Amino acid sequence: MKSGTEGRILQLVVVTGISSVVSQLLIIREFLSRFQGNEFVIALILFSWLVIGGFGTWASGLAGSRILPPDRTRLSLLTMLLAVLSPLTLLAVRVLRDVLFVTGSAVGFYATFGYILATIAPYCLLLGFVLPYSLFCARVLEPGFSGTRIYIADNIGDMSGGALFSFLLVFFATPMQALVIVNAALLASAFFLVPPGRRFRLALGLAAAVGIAGLTAMLWTETPSLQRPVGELVHYKESRYGRVEIFKNQGQHTLFLDGRPVFSDQNLVQAEESVHYPLSQLDTVEHVLLVSAEGGMMRQIRKYEPASVDYVEIDPAITRALFQYDMLRKIPGLNVIHQDARLFLSGSDKQYDAILVNLPEPETFQINRFFTIRFFAEARRHLTDNGIFSFHTNDPGNYISEIQGEKISILHQTASAHFSDLLMLPGQRLYFLCADRSLDTNIPAGLAEKNISTQFVRGYYTGNVTPDRIRQIKSRLQADAPVNTDYVPRLVGIMFSQWFAEFESTPAVFMGLLALGLAFYLLRSRSEEFVLFTTGAMTMGSEVLVIFAFQVFFGYIYFEIGLIVTVFLAGLLPGAVIGEYHRNIGRRLFILTDIVLIAAVAAFMAALWFAGDVLPESAFLLFGGIVSLACGIQFPVALHVGGRENPAAVRAFSADLIGAAVGTLAVSVVLMPYFGLIWTAAALIGMKTLSLTFVTVAYDT
């Protein structure tokens, strides 16, 4: 190969990897903000990203030999276009949501999926095209250039991009600033790919200059693009946990967390209900624990003159904004704690008269942790003998659907495992009051006895909370309802089903089309492609599994979760080096690494089941390292077994991407919500066992 060209192509692949990972993470956060997203939305984004990237890779095999013959100048121009498309994609996700859908309205599954496909398709197609096209360009100059070297360079870029975002950019840059930084580097790398004196060098320089000007202009769109049709943006902060925005409309301030309205300074009814329903049950209120809060709650709590109020909110950016805009007021005895609430309780021995949980419905794995039998047990351990525990869900109204009845039944059954009396009171929400003593439904009488004044609860309670409504809710309870656990997050599955029910749709169409497409692809795949497909699914499936399990046992600790993602990327690099060195033993290495993957998942699940409470954080990282190392070994072996020609490389890259897409979707949307941790692991083991059997038979033949 001509001097320096090899290094410049590999450098371009590394920088492309950095840019793509940072872009992916920021675009995911943007979707979560605009669609009030959860793990299902994340799974749809990753699935779409990987599948479209797979199509781009497949297209490179066709266009790379006919329409766009491999050439460094073309590669440079394509990469420059990719650098500009990155911030444009984020801007499209941010702006078009309120153009295509009613502002503030919920969006159904299929509309969300279609929006994801439409907005990210141009970027992902080009991204999938560029990686194998880089290999083709290298092979024009050096026919024996190994595809593994491109794979290794891409892994270095991916790992670096993940670390750069998780530990630097998320703290010091807004989304658009971060994209400008990484894509300016990509533009520079693309420009220097073609040596001085070559044809079109001036044209490339002009293209790079236009790209830099475009990226710079994008910086001015950051705040204007965040404006909503209703209200004025008065506060904006990107924290490591999410986006915090405050909008002012007709004198009312509303705080949005990742696009979801969570606090308002004028929602007095919810503040009164959240506080007075539980606290009116107590003779004296000394110590109160708040897990998140409602706007105006502190003023209501102060009426009981508690000695201490511990307010737990994981994100300091939220509390600073709430106090700055007077949505919450500091009261005597208030102690603000910035920590995961489950982690805080597990490390504290303090007893409380009341624990009030003010969180959204359990539609994410993260929030579900506060509605499980494990958390309810932890809450009971921190209550005094006469203490009370409360939480809420959305009020089902006068008609309780089958799905809503199932959700209420699971919550009732789970809470009843640790509390002898449980009261369900409707209001603006459905409140669950839990205690180990008799509870009274006559809230106004309790308030009158304590001489506590309210604007709504004492005056309107009897009209809203009628005996008929309480009986109706109780009548929908299912005696055989299962409990919600950390290992089997049944409520997450219920919320997923409720999403479809709200829009009178079903996931069957999507799943059916996916199954048909997958069957068509697998029937046309070679043995080494099938191994890579299962390897991609195993890598992403295991990563989702580890992150979920880590949150269960350690809480939402941002740095450690970022470290897990980085470990899953980092293990691929040494694995690829080992696989390239030992590629001549071919299918035997496939068999060995499949056995390692099966054993690793089985051992990890056994460790969680029997010793999850005492398992150190290093065990999660070790498992991630083993899985990614074994998966990394298989890719260069597949390239060697499948042949060194360009079409074989395209098939290998595509198989890995499509497998990763299927693994992400299957684990996040189907296996974890409906079957839980252990059965998800069993499914991954079964898939890899099938791969092992397939390769063993092919090897013997």
Image: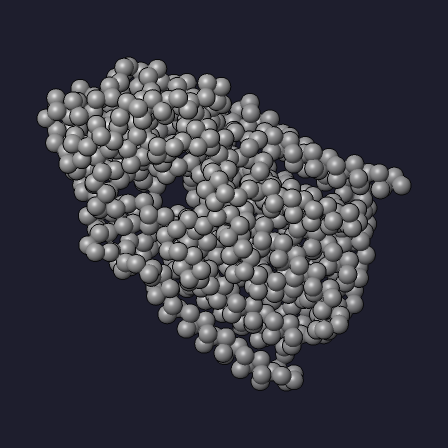
The residue shown at (37%, 70%) is 220
The residue shown at (31%, 15%) is 436
Residue 556 lies, with reference to residue 374, above or below; the image says below
Residue 119 appears at what percent x and percent y? 52, 61
Q: Quadrant of residue 202?
A: bottom right
Considering the image in quadrants, where does the N terminus appear? bottom right
- Image position of 455 (left or right of 339): left
Q: Nearer the viewer, residue 485 or 170?
A: 485
Residue 296 appears at what percent x and percent y? 21, 41
Most distant residue in the right direction: 701
Residue 335 lies, with reference to residue 324, above or below; the image says above
Colour style of the rendered protein structure: one colour
Considering the image in quadrants, where does the C terminus appear? top right
- Image position of 666 (left or right of 449): right
- Image position of 656 (left or right of 96): right
The residue shown at (56%, 72%) is 80
Residue 288 appears in view: no
